[in-house]
Image (cartoon, rainbow, N blue to C red):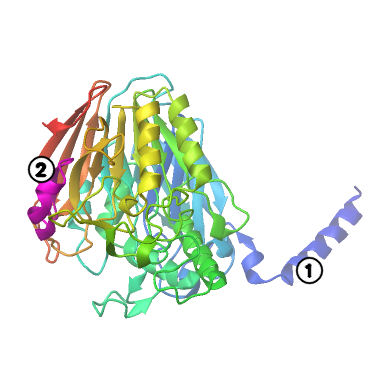
Amino acid sequence: MKRRRFLADLSRYAIICAGLPNDWRVTSRPRFIDDPFTLGVASGDPTPTGAVLWTRLAPRPFEPEGGMPGARPTVAWEVAEDEGFTKIVKRGRYTAAPELGYSVHVEVDGLESDRWYAYRFLSGDAVSQVGRVRTTPAAGALTDLRFGVASCQNYEQGLFTALDHLSRERLDLVTHLGDYIYEYGTRDGAVRPHHGFEVRSLDDYRRRYSQYKMDPALQAAHRMCPWLVTWDDHEVDNNYVGAFGENRMESEEQMLARRAAAYQAWWEHQPVRVPRARSWADLDIRRTTDWGALARFWMMDTRQYRDDQACADGSQVVPCGDWANPARSVLGAQQEKWIDEGLAASRSRWQVLAQQIMLAPFDPRLGPETLAAMDPWSGYPAARERLLGTIAERAPNRTVVLTGDIHSNFVNELRSGFDRPDRPVVAAELVGTSLASGGDGEDAWRQFTNAAGENPHVKWHSARRGYITCDVSGSEWRADYREVPYVTRPGAPVETRTSWRIEHGRAGISRA
């Protein structure tokens, strides 16, 4: 190309660019009105050679566009062997887009397996806090694992004291099972009546995530290690299923639009590697993560694909309505097939089903009548029996189900079916309480105390706040239930309330 033509074309392009909206311009030297990294940093979905590194530029998170000026700033990222960044092993640049909330999702690759790294982000004159990320062991390696289980962090019902303690544990990984935010509450965090304000738009969901992400304890827990994250209902609407909201006041079209906004905001604020969808309303978050040959984590979705709750939801005496209809599903046909074929093919020592709602039944009513909650698996008995049958056939006594949602701790033995009491035990379920939802809680539900004898598969229960830590080897799984006595005021200590042991290949769960 001749020099004169090149300069003429360059001038034309400059004129065109000058006429473009400001949010289409890429700038490598952005100017921020405040620290753009107010929402912290996080890592997740690790592999033997990398992980997802996350942040979101938001100098003033509660203002429109997070207080960003509108251009597309470049964000530098660095991965180093040390937290002083004297030995940087990977670096690159990422362009943050306004239509994605200026979120940053860097998929790092080319790292060594089974080792820790430090990472950070830089943009303009700003430098983020330093996070720690660990790659998983190489395929075939039977490396021990220590990880945490957490869920349900209602910002307005308690302090994140449990997360403060979690951030000080020596963990390789954290699994968060949903209810990361709550869709109801207030814009400013003040405590007001239950449904004083309910988020519906993308901007509202972004502000709600910002409210949570600014919490120092949550930021510290994310900086500690990589997370595996899934969602439950409150990321969209309480007890929603598919295209139906809690109160059925929105049309299917309106609910899908709300779901699209909620799913997009969830993705924008989480360190996740999920396949691209044709629309945000159809975001597929099912995925697996292997910890070498020791464990395969199945991150499941029990909200998007399920049939509506039976008998108008709530707790009902069963049978009722279409409660027992074998066609009703929690996971949907495709996800059921994914679990069935995946468990059959996986050679991992342990199969870990990370999901949201309690799988074991719980009948709080004394006497011959059975009272069942319609939102958990107890409201879908045929679907529950199909999943338990798959576990019994494909991976008996090497499967552990991790559950959140219920704001209470349970230790459950899972049978190949609950239609008869003589069915064999084929798995264990570790139900983790909430981090803050429900306030201080109590030592035990009154209905559990009254009906404990009705539920012989339930080995232990508590309704305080906290999390679970799990130490996993090839032969044994130990679960410690870590609790705080209160969350409505600061300074609560943490204690191990109880510990449980699962032996690989042996039925049942016992106190450690």
Query: If you read the primary sequence from the N terminus, does the residue marked by circle 1 or circle 2 appear first?
Result: 1
Q: As drawn, is 121 to the left or to the right of 503?
A: right
* Three-letter amino acid code at the position of disc 1: Ile
What number is the disc on residue 15? 1
Work out whether residue 511 or residue 93 is closer to the camera in this orientation and state it: 511
Q: Name which residue lies at 18% across and 49% down.
A: 409
The image's mark for residue 496 is 2
Whole-angstrom CA distance, mark 1 to mark 2, is 66 Å
What percent of the width, then of the height, locates residue 312? 36, 67
Q: Quadrant of residue 438?
A: bottom left
Q: Secondary structure at mark 2?
A: strand
Q: Which residues are magenta?
A: 444-463
Q: Residues within 10 Å of mark 1 (few under 14, many from 20)?
A: few
Q: In screen coordinates, is 215 left or right of 298? A: left
- Residue 17 drawn at (x, y percent): 74, 66
Residue 484 can be seen, yes or no: no
Q: Position of 149 compared to 345: left or right?
A: left
The vertical placement of 423 against 54, above or below, is above
Residue 313's disc is none
Give amino acid for label 2: Thr
Mark 1 touches mark 2? (CB < 8 Å)? no
User: Looking at the image, can residue 62 be seen?
Assistant: yes
255 lies left or right of 493: right
Q: Is residue 512 above or below residue 379?
A: above
